[in-house]
Image: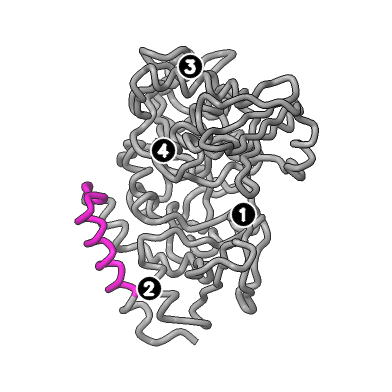
Amino acid sequence: MMPADLEINAERLRETMAKALAADGVLAEPGWRAAIERVPRHRFVPGFYLPADERDEQGLTVWEPVTAESDYGRWLAAAYSDTTLIAQFNGDEPDWKQPAVRHGGAPTSSSTLPSLVVRMWTDADVQEGHTVLEIGTGTGYSTALACERLGSADVTSIEVDPYRLEQAASTLYGCGYTPTLAVADGLYGYWPEAKFDRIVAACSFRAVPPALLAQARPGGKILLTLSGWLYGYARVLLTVNGDGTAEGHLLPSTVSFMSARTHAAPAFGNPAHWAAGLLEAGRAARHSPERISAATEEAFHLRFLARSAAPDAQMTTVGDVVHLVDVVTGSAATLTPREGRWEVREGGPVRLWERIETVLSAYDEAGRPGPETFTLHVYDGGQHLRHPHLPGLPLPRP
């Protein structure tokens, strides 16, 4: 049973969170601050997972389930923290009446941290009177913020997971919000409600889905996070032209979103099996794999640029050996540290690391430009990142 003062406590915590976000410069527009203060986030997250302080003996993240029944104080405090709350792993819906601790796993649904939700709506230049398509309803919290700000009649939200949408719909309607909701794959948008003034995706795509361009009004804007199987991310704000093309700059800083399920990376098996088929002789690497594997914003950006050269490559590290695997072409590469340098062994029709090195060298020669200096052009037959001092970098086919 919930405490009698739950709603009072929740309102107080919402006000505290709104003040903190405003102090950080997130809530520049009064309309979004009012939405944060009004939308009861705790109703959208009856249960979620938080990471434990330490990993398990296999190095996996230990995810602890949190519900109002198991730990009321921790649950309510987390609901009104600026934190992403994981609600689902690997597409499996938990039993929140008897939740279990998880070890590892790929998050597939969450309530995104409030500052990022507002940032996405703000960066997309969403204004009153705009019709909006949200891709990725998730728990429904971000949908509720949009409804509070714009009115439910102008908001359409789609979700690929029917159970997730059912739960979100129940909470949204229970809170008085009545947007158009549908089970649909974000790769194809939602034709019945098109055309939209704004399209905002809370998941990432390998390339811009053509259907989204067709469903935006001329002059409309699309805010997407682009990613790839190397897990480098970039956000782009596109303006759609009347001829079906679009263009826009990458936005500064990096944000990661879960991949759209149809664009998720495939399993590639045992890296040792791939390495066994490589050439015995190696060469000295021109660039360290740490250029793209380090936990830095530049490495994050470089992983995104590198996938233009190796669009189907995936990367994993076993011990001190870095493996690159391409399940599409059957190519592979390993990078092994050898007395202060890295040795590369490659095999298959595509020399994966050689291609990535070409991009890294061009990036260095161009002065290491940041994301905001790149423009994405989307047109019939292709999608290319362009920069004044770099050759065109193609995106994979949608």
| Residue 388 rendering spot, x and y as whole percentages | 36, 13
Mark 3: amino acid = Thr
The answer for how far apart the CA atoms under marks 3 and 1 are is 34 Å
| Disc 1 residue type (three-letter) | Ala
Residue 223 lies in what quarter of the image? top left
Disc nearer the start of the sequence (4/2): 2
* Residue at image point 41% right, 34% down: 198
Residue highlighted by disc 2: 77
The tag earlier along the polypeptide, 3 or 1, is: 1
Q: Distance of mark 4 from mark 2, alpha carbons?
A: 33 Å
Mark 2, mark 3: which one is toward the viewer? 2
Query: Sequence-wise, which precedes: disc 1 or disc 4?
Result: 1
Tell me the residue that label 3 is attached to: 245
Tag of residue 20: none
Residue 389 percent coordinates (x, y) = 37, 13
Residue at figure coordinates x 44%, y 25% from the top left: 217
Q: Return the residue at label 1.
A: 106
Question: Of the residues under marks 1 and 2, which one precedes in the sequence?
Answer: 2
Label 4 residue SS: loop
Q: Quadrant of residue 88?
A: bottom right
**The magenta stretch spans which residues?**
10-29
| Residue sitting at x 41%, y 65% | 41
Classify mark 3: helix, strand or loop: loop
Whole-Å distance between the Cαs marked 1 and 4? 32 Å
In the rendered image, which quarter contains the C terminus? top right
Q: Mark 1 to mark 2: distance in Å?
A: 24 Å
Say if residue 376 shows up in the picture.
yes
**Residue name at image x 56 percent, y 16 percent:** 382
Q: What secondary structure characterizes most of the magenta part?
A: helix
